[in-house]
Image (cartoon, rainbow, N blue to C red):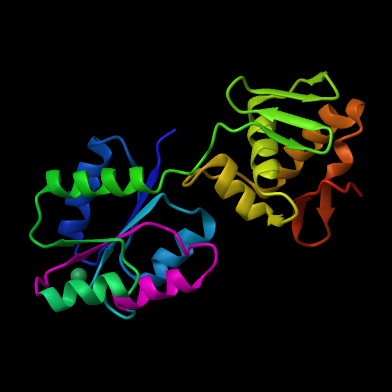
Amino acid sequence: MAVTILVVEDEPAIRSLIEVNLRRAGYAVALAADANEAQRIVNETLPALVLLDWMLPGISGIEYARRLRRDARTKTLPIIMLTAKSEERDKVDALEGGADDYVTKPFSARELMARIKALLRRNAPHTTDDLIKIGDLLLDPVSHRVSALDETVNLGPTEFRLLHFFMAHPERVHSRTQLLDRIWGDGVYVEERTVDVHIRRLRAALEPTKCDDMIQTVRGTGYRFSASGR
Ligand code: CA
């Protein structure tokens, strides 16, 4: 599944040059000519990384980076700022504005791709291989085994990832959007309903062990995994 890079650049020639290079490198690409268009894309599906031009019509790139940082959903979205400015002060402004990295125009495609790769690697979701035990439920990320009181629980790959995420972040409410972003990955478009389907499957699989109560529906908000049950 290709990860999506969002390119926010008002100059068509530069935008398509970047697009060609990204596609060649195996990324999926979303294109926006200004911040408003970019935000519409981000609302629909979170990209893995944003290439953001500094000089944009309307809302500037640096102002848009600040907005992304203020929103809980996009607070940690990796941002590389593109700019014709090359003074040290501008670089500091870009980084303080919320960009993770900074590339000065004109840039070589190879350099840009290397920066993207490095930033994506730095931001890869942190998963540990530690055994997790909550209540009667035991999850082993290495062997992909789940058990409760020595009974094996058989789960599909999505249900396993869902349970792993829940058990790694217990007692917290997760919205469907957050679960989509974290379980299905950045840049993948899945309907919110899909989350409910997999929650149902997960509960059904846990039901014989009586651990299904640990997955709680939080009305109007999302789901929570709780050791205390219902
Ligand atoms: Ca521009």
Confirm whether the magenta stretch covers residue 63.
yes
Q: Is residue 41 visible?
A: yes
Quadrant where the N terminus is found in the figure:
top left
Which residue is found at the position 9% from the left and 75% from the top?
Answer: 87
In the image, which residues are magenta? 60-87
Percent x, y of residue 186: 48, 46
Q: Is residue 230 above or below residue 53?
A: above
Which residue is found at the position 67% from the left and 30% from the top?
Answer: 160
Q: Is residue 55 visible?
A: no
Which residue is found at the position 75% from the left and 54% from the top?
Answer: 171
Relative side of 68 to 199, left or right: left
Using the image as rendered, state which of residue 101 and residue 3 is in the foreground: 101
Confirm whether the magenta stretch covers residue 158.
no
Using the image as rendered, state which of residue 157 and residue 8 is in the foreground: 157
Using the image as rendered, state which of residue 68 and residue 6 is in the foreground: 68
Relative side of 2 to 224, left or right: left
**Quadrant observed for ligand 1 in the rendered image:** bottom left
Q: Quadrant of residue 24?
A: top left
